[in-house]
């Protein structure tokens, strides 16, 4: 398994597997705009570009006109990336998450909970950098760096 890598990914390439709470997105949008920075990159499965953690940040960045999204890329098969649920319900697999994202029929908000069995370094990105229309990093070449989880 490759270690997590930080990248600025084209927003349009990312796939969502979970719906969001509109009020939470609005509050997060206001906070990011006021701070001018995204403090925590979202988590993305390297192979499928499915968002694992950070759907609310993704939506906030969309509303703020970001062309790129700061992300930690993971090998989804890595045993250090664990899939859980926020509340009781049927067992879900990582394959279920990817299939939902590809189907365009997302799970309700806060269905899945991804947990890392290791720490990520801190990695903030300015909103100005994300709004800039410059080229996003190609999928083949992605540098490293980073920060820890939050939704």
Image (cartoon, helix red, strand yellow):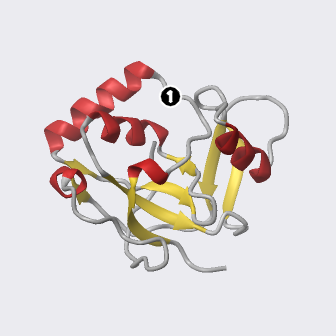
State the residue at coordinates (28%, 66%). Answer: 135
Residue with the mark numbered 1: 20
Residue 42 spot, x, y in % from top left: 45, 52
Say which of 141 and 73 sits in front.
141
Q: Quadrant of residue 26?
A: top left
Specify whether 33 is left or right of 84: left
Specify whether 49 is left or right of 141: right
State the residue at coordinates (29%, 50%). Answer: 67
The correct choice, above or below, for 41 with respect to 75 in the image is: above
Residue 4 spot, x, y in % from top left: 52, 72
- Residue farthest along the right direction in this orientation: 90
Residue 97 spot, x, y in % from top left: 71, 45
The correct choice, above or below, for 62 with respect to 47 in the image is: above
Say which of 86 and 143 sits in front.
143
Q: Quadrant of the N terminus?
A: bottom right
Q: Mark 1: few, some, or many residues within 10 Å (few <14, many ≥20)? A: some
State the residue at coordinates (29%, 33%). Answer: 63
Residue 18 spot, x, y in % from top left: 60, 35
């Amino acid at each position: 398994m490759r270690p997590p890598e930080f990248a600025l990914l084209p927003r349009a390439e990312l796939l969502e597997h979970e719906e969001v709470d509109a009020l939470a997105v609005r509050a997060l949008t206001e906070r990011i705009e006021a701070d001018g920075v995204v403090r925590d990159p979202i988590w993305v499965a390297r192979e499928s570009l499915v968002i694992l953690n950070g759907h609310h940040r993704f939506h906030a960045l969309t509303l703020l006109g970001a062309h790129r999204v700061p992300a930690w890329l993971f090998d989804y098969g890595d045993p250090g990336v664990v899939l859980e649920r926020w509340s009781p319900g049927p067992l879900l697999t990582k394959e279920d998450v990817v299939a939902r994202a590809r189907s365009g029929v997302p799970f309700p908000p806060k269905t899945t909970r991804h947990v890392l069995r290791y720490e990520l370094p801190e990695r903030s990105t300015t909103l100005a950098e994300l709004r800039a229309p410059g080229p996003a990093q190609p999928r083949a070449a992605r540098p490293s760096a980073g920060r820890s989880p939050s939704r």
